[in-house]
Amino acid sequence: ISGIEVGHGAAAAPDGSRIYISNEADNTLDVVGGETLKVTYRIPLCGHPNNISIGRDGRRVYVAIREEPGRVDVVDTPSLKKVKSIPVKGAVHNTFVTPDGRYVVAGSIVGKNAAVIDTHTEQPAWVMDFDLGVRPMAFEPNGDGSTGRMFVQLTEFNGFAVVDFATHKELTRIELP
């Protein structure tokens, strides 16, 4: 894909029709045709973007804004417009959509937290603070598809924290050799 000087995060529409790429050079979310691999549209963001995630139905892209104050920009994919900037504590490095699609989790290295945003209200639901910066994370679904546990990689810790999603409590840390 040409025309994107400093691409960082990428996510594809569920049907493969589009690819969304956060463009650090232009502070935009660039829209790329899935078949042509050409940039078709650039959506201005509120600041310097980092990683992104896409909702399960493909109607929203959640862009981590990596500058203070921390924010998650919400882009409506049918209209190709930024519809909201959700404030969170600390510059955001990553966003992840939970397995059930009910939440977006924004991880902040500087803010040392994971901010959980309700995808229906597009408002923060809860925040979990850590003693170290929050980096990538993964989720384990419950049998009913809801989110059971969250596995959070922490800065300068060779391993990850295990969090019970329902109680918002850290259960343990797994240190790798």
Image (cartoon, rainbow, N blue to C red):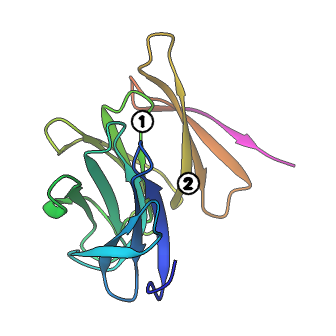
> Could you tell me if residue 109 is visible in this image?
no
Find residue 98 and name its label.
1
* Left/right of residue 89 with respect to residue 80 in the rendered view: right
State the residue at coordinates (30%, 77%): 28
In terms of secondary structure, what is the magenta stretch mainly? strand
Q: Give SS at disc 2.
A: strand
Q: Give SS at disc 1.
A: loop
Residue placed furthest toward the top: 143
Label 2 amino acid?
Answer: Pro
- Image x and y of residue 10, in percent: 47, 63
Closer-to-camera residue (110/11): 11
Closer-to-camera residue (52/138): 52
Q: Which picture quadrant has residue 101? A: top left
Q: Name the residue under label 2.
A: 136
- Image x and y of residue 145, in percent: 44, 17
- Image x and y of residue 53, in percent: 40, 53
Front disc: 2 or 1:
1
Q: Is residue 95 above or below residue 165?
A: below
Q: Give the range drawn in magenta.
A: 171-177
Label 1 amino acid?
Answer: Thr
State the residue at coordinates (41%, 20%): 146
Closer-to-camera residue (68/15): 15
